[in-house]
Amino acid sequence: MSITSDLIRGHTETIILARLMMKDSYGYEINKTIQEKTDHQYELKEATLYSAFRRLEQAGFILSYWGDETTGARRRYYSITPIGKAAYTNNKKDWKEAKELIDKLI
Amino acid sequence: MNNKIRNKLELLFEEAPKTKKAVELKEELIVNLTEKYDDLVVLGKSPEDAYNSVIASIGDVDELIRGLKQNDVLSIEREQTERKKTAMVVAGAVGAYILSVIILITLTAVFNVDGVIATMVFLLIVGFATCVLIYHFMSKPSYIKADETIVEEFKEWKQGRSQKNQLCKSLISIMWTLITAIYLLISFTLNIWAYSWIIFIIGAVIEQMIKLIFDMNSTREQ
């Protein structure tokens, strides 16, 4: 199965929320963590990542701020909001239920 | 190599609207892609390969840019509804002016109402219509920003602030006109000239309250 298929892409936003639950982060760091955690089997396209950021921000699940870096250009950091955390918990529960259900059926 | 990545992004964002959001997104992409490039070079990739990998990982920016454009389209629709509202308010106010004259003439000629009272009614309707007109024109932002740069935001803020001062002054002068009208009205009808001047003291209090409200609003916005 191609890892970049729709099966995983639907969960992009929850994946991002999961990373932000750990700590505030910026675009590339989030993508890098995802790569490392999946042993380089999964990598998000930048466009997909940033579309997801925008959707999450519009929904109020995350907010962004500019970091002040000592070297190099400034980065845009994202942090999760209370309703973002609630959305993450909900989505995780939904996924667990769906996983159990489908495991029984196939 | 930083410039090469930057140039590529500028090219991709050519079609994007020239707004602050678009610029910020472009900057964010450049920063992240550059960091990715640096990491790849550290891992041992050649500059060429690293650059190609980075560009290949961008994916499809069209959806991103379309999303940026969408926000602009919404504001055009909002502008149209604002325009219709303005037209309605102006039409209503002018209608009220004409109506007030008709009422004045009708009251005195047909119903034989005392001339002073009829004039007071006339003035009140005119005052009300003028209030509505001024409020409407002062509360809509007459300065539409050319884009979302800091310069344009500053111009809009400056305009807004002077508008608020004018609105405050207009409200206060309307209030005094009404106070005078009410003073004359109740004095003539109730013949209490000895006491009715107190209303001017009340007017002074109202003026201070209006100023206080505007001050509170502007400190809250800061």
Image (spheres, helix red, strand yellow):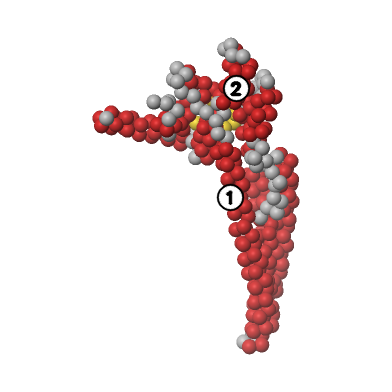
Query: Mark 2 falls on what kind of element?
Result: helix
Outermost residue toward the top in this view = B44
Q: Quadrant of residue B56?
A: top right
| Among the 4 quarters of the image, the one containing residue B131 | bottom right
Name the amino acid type tagged 2. Asn
Picture quadrant where residue B15 is located: top right
Q: Disc 2 marks which residue?
A: B52
Please determine whether, in this image, residue B134 is positioned above or below residue B19: below
**Amino acid carrying mark 1 in the image:** Leu
Q: Position of residue A91 (x, y in %)?
A: 39, 33
Is residue A65 visible from the viewing direction of this image? yes
Around disc 2, counting alpha carbons within 10 Å, would you say few (fewer than 14), some (14 to 19), or many (20 or more)? few
Which chain is home to disc 2? B
Mark 1, other Cα within 10 Å: few <14 / some 14–19 / many ≥20: few
Residue B72: x %, y % from top left: 61, 47
Asked whether the viewer can see residue B199, the reply is: no
Residue at image location 57% in from the left, 22% down from the top = B53
The residue to which callout 1 is attached is: B74
Q: Is residue B151 above or below residue B163?
A: above
Depth-wise, is mark 1 or mark 2 nearer the camera?
A: 2
